[in-house]
Image (cartoon, rainbow, N blue to C red):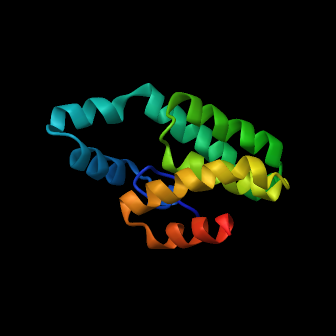
Amino acid sequence: MPPGTRKGRDFACGSPVQRLADAIQDTTTLGTARRRLASPDTASQDAMMAAGLSLVFSKGDFPAAAAQFRSVLERNPTHYGATYQLAAVLDRMGQPAQARPLWVKVLGMATTYRDDKTIQVARDRLR
């Protein structure tokens, strides 16, 4: 499954425990990490991602899924999973010109996170 969290881990692995580990890595204090994880917006983004993934993989409703991923990106423009999924959905909808700038962004993010699998996917899409 493609990445769904901003650290490049699979969306299915975005458990509260994993998000806590990611937050601790990204912040200087545990208190800041806890506040970040408790944010209703984080939960909302997770719910929107789950809905978008369900629309893609269970219903094949790509336009509705694209809208979900765009909503996540409106709240968090650097959301790794939403960027990846929106690019993939646009490709599946036959809109490679719209997907291309997202794949460029995904490649940059994946390089930063040293996510070799996603780097290869993005490079393949950009050929």
User: At x 52% / y 41%, what residue is drawn?
Assistant: 46
> Nearest the camera: 41 or 101?
101
Q: Is residue 125 above or below residue 65?
A: below
User: At x 50% / y 49%, what residue is drawn?
Assistant: 80
User: At x 82% / y 42%, what residue is drawn?
Assistant: 63
Q: Position of residue 30 (x, y in %)?
A: 16, 38
Q: Is residue 1 visible?
A: no
Task: Tell me if 87 is positioned left or right of 31 in this view.
Answer: right
Q: Is residue 80 above or below residue 123?
A: above
User: At x 54% / y 55%, what residue is drawn?
Assistant: 106
Q: Position of residue 38 (x, y in %)?
A: 35, 31
> Nearest the camera: 107 or 43?
107
Q: Is residue 42 visible?
A: yes
> Nearest the camera: 75 or 107?
107
Q: Position of residue 14 (x, y in %)?
A: 44, 53
Q: Position of residue 72 (x, y in %)?
A: 58, 35
Task: Tell me if 88 is positioned left or right of 108 in this view.
Answer: right
Position of the N terminus by quadrant: bottom right
Position of the C terminus by quadrant: bottom right
Task: Tell me if 32 is positioned left or right of 14 in this view.
Answer: left
